[in-house]
Amino acid sequence: MSRARPRRFTSPRRSLGLRTFSGRLAAIVIVGLVLRVWYASAVAPDLGLSGDAKYYHEAANLLAEGHGFIDPVRHDFAGRRIEITTATGDARTITLPVPFDVPTAGHPPVYVVYLSLFSRLGVGTVLGHRIASALLGSLSVLLAGLAGRELLHGRAGAERLGLISASVTATYAYVWVNDGLVMSETAAIAVAFAITWVGLRFAHNPTRARAAVFGVLGGLCALTRAELVLYLPVVALIVLVRAPITWRMRVERYAIAGVVALLCISPWVIRNLIAFADPVFLSNGAGTVLVQANCDDTYYGPDIGYWSLRCGEPQPYGPNGEILDEAQRDKVVRVRALDYIGDHRARLLTVVVPRRVGRMWGVYRPLHQIDLDVLVEARPKWVSQLAFVQYLVLAPCAVIGAFICRRRRIPLAACAVWAVLVTITAASAFGNTRYRTAAEVSIVLLASVTMFALTEWWAERRTELA
């Protein structure tokens, strides 16, 4: 009679795979998702939608209903009688047509398309779109883990760095606050982490296939937020110049990435060129941004370097009161803004631009900027305060992390370029915390490098003391 073999005990931790990188990363992603869903369902519902958030929510529902990309604000105003001032200064009352469905390219399409997928499934409420954003936000946690691991590709501790990066992303309030606001920054952070991960992989091995994938993500970035379009050409150039390959291969890889990116954005660009009277490429909101950021309200007084809705008034109409499309309106206000800039060029360069950059990086009147985030962006005050405290810890760590990367010859461009690009954006537009969104990727990854170095130091210290 054979003896029964003893049953081997398997710990729950091992059975769940929590000893592996994938298992631990999945656990962190779940924690991040729970936090985001709680915020989106329990905290954010107290916040109403307005401005860009209202635009994204309503534009997604209209797209799902088959209206295409139309301006949700003007759709809501169909049939109303409004008072206008013509270009000649005459006051007039007009009745808006029904339906008042006019094309829009006020924002690139990715976030609207993403939300519209949930609307098509019957999840088109504000809460539904907040939960959808939370799901997208949790994807950023996963991508942060992959990017952090790729940063130390082939080196000891790569997986630990990836887990640290994912943990920071899961809990950093400046990342998850956008999910409950229904703002495109949620999508911008996700694609920024994705292209950073792909950019690091491309830096480690610039093959044709990776150049093509890099191009796809570059096109997706441009279709998410227009200012992200610069990342691909800048990083690809830096990576390929430093790569140990021939110049012919460098030119070939750069061309592949560029052509693929252009193919990705071409349907949207072609649609815009057909839909509007004046040429429009990625979006036509540049004039609106310029006119709201360049006026007396933003050059003088307490809001220097910020923006003012009042500066965009009155809304432009044609000489006889005819309704202009988005591109035509944007052209009118852009000319108005450029005239103001021309008259105040010296103050712009010496006073306004430094304060714009200072607002975005939290070094110029940070408490006032928190108040503006609460008032204008509808962020909960306690979340903004928590986010700023976390930022005060992470930002110096990121600077130290950049020096560590240089010292250890870790590819830096793919994750550090975001800081340069958002600084250019703030200087040319206005200072705003959410304009720093893409640079949160740089902050998270580089701060995680510092934390990783501290864990290394502590492990060595314990070994010496043992």
Image (cartoon, grey):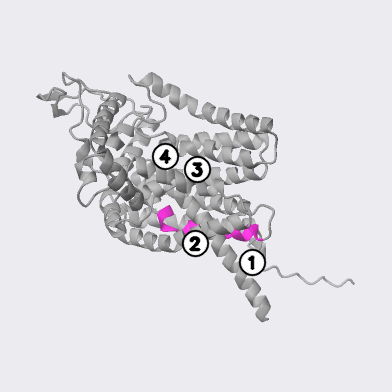
Q: Secondary structure at mark 2?
A: helix
The residue lying toward the viewer, choosing from 395 and 188, is 395
Point out the frontmost of discs 2 and 3: 2
Residue 155, disc: none
Point out the frontmost of discs 4 and 1: 4
Is any atom of residue 278 visible in this view? yes
Q: Secondary structure at mark 3?
A: helix
> Which callout, 1 or 3, points at the residue further toward the start of the chain?
1
In x, y percent, where is residue 172? 44, 58
User: Mark 3 — residue?
Assistant: 191
The residue lying toward the viewer, choosing from 430 and 64, is 430
C-alpha distance separating marks 2 and 4: 35 Å
Above or below, 101 relative to 214: above
The residue lying toward the viewer, choosing from 38 and 313, is 313
> Which callout, 1 or 2, points at the residue further toward the start of the chain?
1
Q: Residue at x 57, y 37 (%)?
A: 237
Q: Main secondary structure of the magenta part?
A: helix
User: Mark 1 — residue?
Assistant: 12
> Which callout, 3 or 4, points at the residue further toward the start of the chain?
4
User: Mark 4 — residue?
Assistant: 115
User: Mark 2 — residue?
Assistant: 397
C-alpha distance separating marks 1 and 2: 35 Å
* Quarter residue 457 falls in: bottom right
Say if mark 4 contacts mark 1, CB within 8 Å. no
Q: Residue at x 27, y 53 (%)?
A: 372
> Which callout, 4 or 1, points at the residue further toward the start of the chain?
1
Q: Which residues are magenta?
A: 157-176
